[in-house]
Image (cartoon, rainbow, N blue to C red):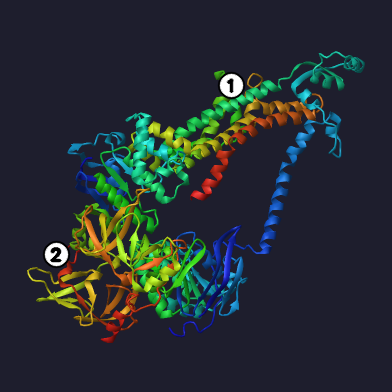
Amino acid sequence: MSSVELQKITKRFKYVTALEDVSFMVHDREFFVLLGPTGAGKTSTLRIIAALLKQDSGSVLFDGEVVDGLTPADRDVAFVFQQYSLYPTMTVYDNLAFPLRSPLRKTPEDEIKTKVEHAAEILRISHLLDRKTAKLSGGEMQRVSIGRAIVREPRMFLMDEPLSNLDAKLRESLRVELQHMQKTQGNTTLFVTHDQIEALTMADRIGVLNEGRLIQVGTPVDIYDRPATTFVAQLVGTPRINLLPAGRENGTIHVDESLLQMPAPEGRTLPDKLLVGIRPEDISLNPTGQFNGTVVLTEPLGVETIVHVQSGERTLLSLAPGMIHLQRGADIRFNLLQDRLHFFDETGKRIA
Amino acid sequence: MAQIELKQVEKLFGEKYAVKPMDLTINNGEFVCLLGPSGCGKTTTLRMISGLETASGGTILLDGENVTWHHPSDRDIAFVFQLYALYPHMTVRDNIAFPLQAEGMNKDDIDTRVSEVVDILRIGHMLKYKPGKLSGGDQQRVALARALVRRPKAFLMDEPLGALDAELRETMRAEIKALHIAQNATTVYVTHDQVEAMALSDRIVVMSAAEVQQVGTPAEVYYDPANLFVAGFIGSPGMNVLKGQLDGDVVRFLGNNNTLPLPARYRIPLLTTLDADKNVIVGFRPEAGTINADGSMQGEVYAVDMHGAYKLLHVNLGDVPDTHEPTIVHLRTDRMASNPMGSQLRFTVDPAMMRFFDPKSGKAILPSQTDQTDRQPVEVLSTTAEGQA
Amino acid sequence: MSDFYEVGPAEPVVISTRVDKVSPKARREHNVRAAIVIAIAMFCLLPIFVMSMTAFKTRSDAVSAPPKLLFKPTLEGFVFLFTERALVPPARAQELLASDTTDLSLFERVALSSGQEITGPSDYVGRLKNSLIIAGVSTIFSVVLGFFAAYAFSRFDVPGKDDLMFFILSTRMLPAVVVTIPLFLMYRQFGLHDTYQGMILLYTVFNLSLAVWLLKGFIDEIPLEYEEAALVDGYSRIQAIFKIVLPQAMTGIAATVVFSLIFAWNEYAFALMLTSDKARTAPPTIATMLGRGGIEWSAIAAGSLGFLIPVAIVVFLLRDYLLRGVTFGAVRR
């Protein structure tokens, strides 16, 4: 397996800039997730690494060597697409064997057989080898796609939203399998997704991309606990973080249009106008809580319940454990976990 | 508003059941979700209620009146589609006014009615636009307005949030719930997303393979699933289910050395229900497990999911001998818990949260008496919260 | 808003995309519809049925009014189609038929029984062969060239793509009659008149625009990911085309083959003007049979029947691909 580095990659299409000065590194054996909304430039990044797309400027390095001149075949990466990458006219076996039969590799058939059967076993698709791919379910298809990547022992895996067309239950179980496989086999993996749960749960590190720019790179805990901008803060976590415009007077922060106020944390210089971010799980309902509000709505999810609490003109989302039912309009008291508050300036940048 | 009753309603496509005979009463003002995977018959059921599809058998009553063979337009029911179904060439206002114009209402009344629903849904600023200019969420708001403006007896919604992205879906879900609380209109809502169903419903009808699996409140389907399908489908991830064998006061799990103590209230029901081989399936929710060095359950961490607010551990209790498939249970732990992949751990399971299923039928085995600890304290927090109000 | 619903129910408007009724009434309607479809199909096939019958009728049966439904089948039409004949005196004919010589072939007997003697083969078989060669080769050329052109238009950033596509289409806009005269003069100059090369060139060029347009649509439908996966897996682009694109474009290719072949096979105006003998195809031949001393209806019917068969065979061979195209297209989108 190899490391891959992007140096100042820029790519412009006719009307839009897909990538602007993007640099990051995926270490050997690392699971790196590029997270961003549709059109952020995630797929373009993958395609540039695979040489399916040519960057306007900047370089791609594998193991410290520039590979800009190499064709897709010569770069020796495996690409798992969102869909449509299994050849419908071939059996599962032939699909898995396809990369090994390429003129670059010319693997003898008995060796192909060993490798295909080994990969099939890892992914538990041995019983499907004789089927035509058109007859497979969505989850089976995506397993075969991943299988086609692992038979080759490539320098790295590039995965373009491979789970997004599957139903929720299947996505959950494949996510676990993928994570387990990556860790036990030590494959360098660059995984692209718009789903924050996929990013948080699988990644060693996450790179957040928006409108062609890399906004933050960090571990899932970094991204969740110390989002660099309000965009990142809103991108990760369900339900979404509460973002409240607030003003600072002396040592106190007042949330606009509400009764919420809190002491400004020690040792930080905060501007007069700012945004306070509070994650729903950091608002704890408590009969002796410091703040009060009224219940707007409860949404029981099973393991926890989202409670919409109104304070002044603001509605906050709070997450409480268990299944709770509260009457609309009921008064309720709550606490904020002061040391888990996030502060952003008016442009949305995190205040350190 | 209206009560909707289905009596032995069924739908056949050729020889195959799309919906097996089902009974269901939806009370006046109730919000009921039809929940299930694609192809389970939920949409067909909704379409039979609307009249877009005719029942192959049974009767559908609307406020006691048999409407089984009535044309959709004679049922006074509004339908909200997944893909909005707004007329692209009309402005938002004309779209909303369209059903009223169709029935020949005079212009002033139309204006009053339109402005009423526009206020409820806060879409006043977009009346002059064509639907194509609006975001997905706004389009769905307009579609809701067009349904509301008619003041129908009931609302039928077919995955109205299915085409929206995750973030908007969360917002619109809360809006639909708020709208329902304010209007208290009888609503039947179809979805494949269990989170949506849990968050919105008064009652959930869980369907699978053309058949109703369980009808119950969100708390009932979550804590007391009627069968293995419901147990696995509700929750993210679903309930952990493990094959085991009853052995005196404990359940031994197959393929590994783990045991769990048998809660006393299940002893007699299990002994009377189970076969001589004493095979049983044990279920428990991920939050019922607690990491504990003295726990009777032991396994190796297979994968770790960081979810931000919490961590989900996937623990392998041991590979199944013949298939080499791991036996995975999911445990919900603190976000800062440190259990790296490959490490060993022990855990306990809250006996109040243990459930038992018959391995042959997959049906839940009910305890002999429902004691207070059996169910999660649904109302406890609410009484404290309201009590101090 | 408490009185929101008290104004009473309004007339609902239900936006329905599909209304399924499987009531008994709907079943009956289904049967009626099926019957109507069968009737229409039979009505459409009537000319072919009449033609097939006529091919086996005698000269007099063929023209009798009202048409005979029951008749004694004869091979007269086929004999007249495949042979050149001369009249023989009736007595001589009888004599020849009566004599027990077994060296008379079936065709000769049939000819004699209508008072004629076979003098040699007709040019029908040769013309049919010309048709097969010209239509077949030009179809292969236009589909192969069209496939690669369509692939390029579909996958690459060809400069002026839209204008080029329109230009290609524009070659079909002039009616054949308008261009035959200049073509005739040009072909005479270049020595292409009445040659296989000339006709193949003409039909290839004419069909190429259709092939490019049709195939581009089909190739556009094949997701790019398939080829990209192959490229990443270590294949060159040309290998990816043959291993990945070609098998999936088979329905489109089959449709294009059928359309091109049918055009080249049926084409009449150019063939009439630009060929005279060596490269003359079947359509003008059959037409000119009308004019040769009395109309041989049964011979014409037999000729037309023979003319139908090759196209029918090709469509039959390709039917799986064609049908898959119809059903897949509907399901995939």
Q: Amino acid at mark 2?
A: Ile
Label 1 packing within 10 angstroms: few (<14), some (14-19), many (20+): many
Q: Residue at x 37, y 30 (%)?
A: A110
- Relative vertical location of residue C12 with respect to residue B134 in this rendering, above or below: below
Q: Is residue A198 left or right of residue C103?
A: left
Q: Nearer the viewer, residue C100 or A322?
A: A322
Q: Quadrant of residue C194?
A: top right
Q: Chain of mark 2?
A: A
> From this viewpoint, is residue B296 visible?
yes
Circle 1 or circle 2, nearest the eye: 2
Chain at numbered mark 1: C
Image coordinates of residue B270 in percent, x first then y, are: 41, 68
Report the residue marked by disc 1.
C196
Residue under pointer 2: A351
Q: Position of residue B174 (x, y in %)?
A: 36, 72
Identify whether A303 is placed above or below C241: below
Q: Is residue C64 left or right of residue B34?
A: right
Q: CA distance from mark 1 to mark 2?
A: 82 Å
- Check disc 2 and report its element: helix, strand or loop: loop
Label total for image: 2
Q: Which mark is residue C207?
A: none
Q: Is residue B125 visible in the rendered structure shown here? A: no
What amino acid type is highlighted by mark number 1? Tyr
**Marks 1/2 same chain:** no
Percent x, y for residue C214? 51, 39
